[in-house]
Amino acid sequence: QQQVKQSPQSLIVQKGGISIINCAYENTAFDYFPWYQQFPGKGPALLIAIRPDVSEKKEGRFTISFNKSAKQFSLHIMDSQPGDSATYFCAAGLGPSGSRLTFGEGTQLTVNP
Amino acid sequence: NAGVMQNPRHLVRRRGQEARLRCSPMKGHSHVYWYRQLPEEGLKFMVYLQKENIIDESGMPKERFSAEFPKEGPSILRIQQVVRGDSAAYFCASSPPGRALGEQYFGPGTRLTVT
């Protein structure tokens, strides 16, 4: 019940295109859903996060869409750039009442120039 | 404001030796988390600590692994009698007290290689 399933495993997009990464969770107690970006040899960097009381959150070119009934959430990267090429991880947490994050397996995004 | 700091960045140990990984949280953060990342995999939670307290160690292997976050100084993840399967990247994250928003900020990691 603690799993977070992420897809696709890898994604290739042309510059200027839209990158879409999907995640699904099982535990309905999760109430915090962040996305992290990781470059090779670096630590994960918090990109954007959402709580289940909203269905969408946008920050610049990055948008999270959240579907509570389906227990799914996704990351959309608009106008994808070669510099966005990285591994993206979704995660789910229990908010203030619990502190561990459960991560998806990651999506390796390549944006071709 | 410096981010989460971890040292060493790379650590090579022979089988049977001890590995000590250090983590200094962001200024003002009192919560520390340790995660392990195996090659080509996601991060797996190991332990959550506050100053002088282990809050959740449900992800820690039962043997050889221990963690502490003393009143003064960095948090330390200790692995005794390392084996090849311990080779991984170990990341520390920190969050501010209260955790009203839930954000965790990660350090650059320590890459442990066991030979």
Image (cartoon, grey):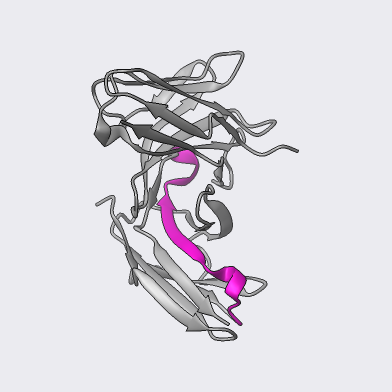
Q: Taking B13 as reference, is A95 left or right?
A: right
Query: Is B35 situated above or below A29?
Result: above
Q: Position of residue B79 (x, y in %)?
A: 35, 22
Residue range in magenta is A79-97
In the displayed orientation, state which residue is furthest to the right: B1
Q: Taking A61 as reference, is B113 left or right?
A: left
Q: Quadrant of residue B87?
A: top left
Quadrant in the picture for the C terminus of chain A: bottom right
Query: Is B53 situated above or below A34?
Result: above
Foreground of the two, A93 or B46: B46
Foreground of the two, B50 or B65: B65
Q: Position of residue B19 (x, y in %)?
A: 40, 22
Q: Residue at x 27, y 23 (%)?
A: B15
* Residue A67 in view, yes or no: no
Q: Residue at x 61, y 77 (%)?
A: A81
* Magenta stretch encompasses residue A21: no
Q: Residue at x 26, y 33 (%)?
A: B84
